[in-house]
Amino acid sequence: MTAAPSSLSTTKVPNRRRQLIAGTIGHLVEWFDWSAYAYLAVFFADQFFPKQSGAGLVPLLATFGVFAVGFLARPFGGLALGAFGDRYGRRAGLSLSIALMGGGSLLVAVCPTYAQIGVLAPVLLVIARLVQGLATGGEWGAASAFMVESAPSHRRGLYSSFLYVGSNIGKIALTGAGGLLVAALGEQAMEGYGWRILFGTGALLAVVGWWIRRSAEETAAHAGHRAGAIERPGVFEFVRRYPAQTFQIFGLTLGPAVAFYTWTAYLPTYAVTAGGIDKGQAMTAATVSLVAFAIAQPFVGMVSDRIGRKPLMLLYAIGFIVGTVPLLSAIGDTVQSLILVQGTGLLLLSGTTAIAAAVSVELFPAQVRVSGISVPYALSVAVFGGTAPVIATALQSAGHAGWFGWYVVACTAVTLITVLTLRETHRAPLPE
């Protein structure tokens, strides 16, 4: 394999603002669609998984099981779409990803219930999540490369932060729309058909996102290898040549993945089932917390461009190791307590989420960059992030809800150790 030229130093990006908008909006749509399942699970769980007598959490537990199944597809998506993005360019990979995501949302929107077609209903639900899992598995690596390669060298942290700005605006739009629908339709109608409206909206937004991404500029300098100018990298070239960086991505992702899906996907459900907060209030709290989280991202990104990536990642890791158990114990029966816990946790988490793309891109050379980021990231998220709501719900059902906080602490400790192995890269050129 011949060396690829630097994606930043040799690639002219005509309009950085347009690149930033295209990357942000596309990621927004992806995460509107992906997050809809987790936020709306409390509304449609009973329709796909019948209740068992005396076990009210069973439908919710089964629905979060399908949530985890979607994550199992992410490493395969990372492998397939990562290789696609390295071979055919970031723009092509991002366009394929959003098309798959929209197709999955459409399938959920029109999926019949268990009462209508029996066991085929949850089977179709699993298929939809598998398709979305494939899409999400390839999204992060391609989007990270696209955004950071589009950035000037002294603004890579800032550009990186806009991925989470986009994803959080997507979640905010979802939870905001969900809260409005609950208020307008009532919980009974929301459980009957209202949740389908949001999945259908996600499918339509995916069409818009696909069009925007198709109009963006390619950032991979080696995109010309389609014509045979540069040898195509092997599917597993990234781990064969860069094993240390591959394991670093896995470790850096582990703790934040567990924390992120605990704070965004599980806490609203926990507040409803254990804290006595109604569903509409839980969605309102999630929206307020995500607004603060989104606003924090660019500021953290800019700070990292000045002082480096490691100090901010260390702040996140130490904060979660010390604060997770007290924060989870502070959730009460008021929406204010949920906002406090969610907001505090997400602000701490921004110390790594805002700069995760920049750190990842700064570890791999251009020719294997998307694969090198996508596969270990997707595998870590699948094994630890996707299973976090299932583990938390199972512990709650077994009467051991307090144990879950220590699980989050242990996962964060792995990330802390990984951060300590990194060298500072914020002033270094991207690897060639």
Image (cartoon, rainbow, N blue to C red):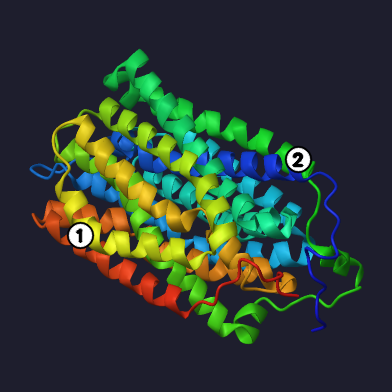
> Helix or strand or loop: what does disc 1 sit on?
helix
Q: Which residue is mark 1?
A: 404
Taking the image as shown, residue 398 lies to the left or right of residue 15, namely: left
Crowding around mark 2 (Cα neighbors within 10 Å: few <14, some 14 to 19, many 20+) is: some
Q: Give me the disc on residue 18.
A: 2
In the rendered view, would you say 33 is above or below 406?
A: above
Looking at this rendering, what residue extends furthest in the top direction? Answer: 184
Q: Earlier in the sequence, mark 1 or mark 2?
A: 2
Residue 338 in view:
yes
> Helix or strand or loop: what does disc 2 sit on?
helix
**Residue at 47% across, 72% down:** 250
Q: Where residue 290 sits: x, y (%)?
A: 41, 38
Q: Which of the two residues, 205 or 171, is positioned nearer the viewer here?
A: 171
Instruction: Point out the image quarter for the N terminus.
Output: bottom right
Q: Where residue 296 sits: x, y (%)?
A: 47, 44
Residue 63 in view:
no
Mark 2: amino acid: Arg
Image quadrant assignment for residue 232: bottom right
Image quadrant assignment for residue 176: top left
**Residue at 17% across, 42% down:** 331
Q: Where residue 42 sits: x, y (%)?
A: 29, 36
Q: Where residue 165 sits: x, y (%)?
A: 54, 42
**Residue at 60% across, 56% down:** 157
**Residue at 14% across, 49% down:** 329
Q: Which of the two residues, 416 or 256, is positioned nearer the viewer here?
A: 416
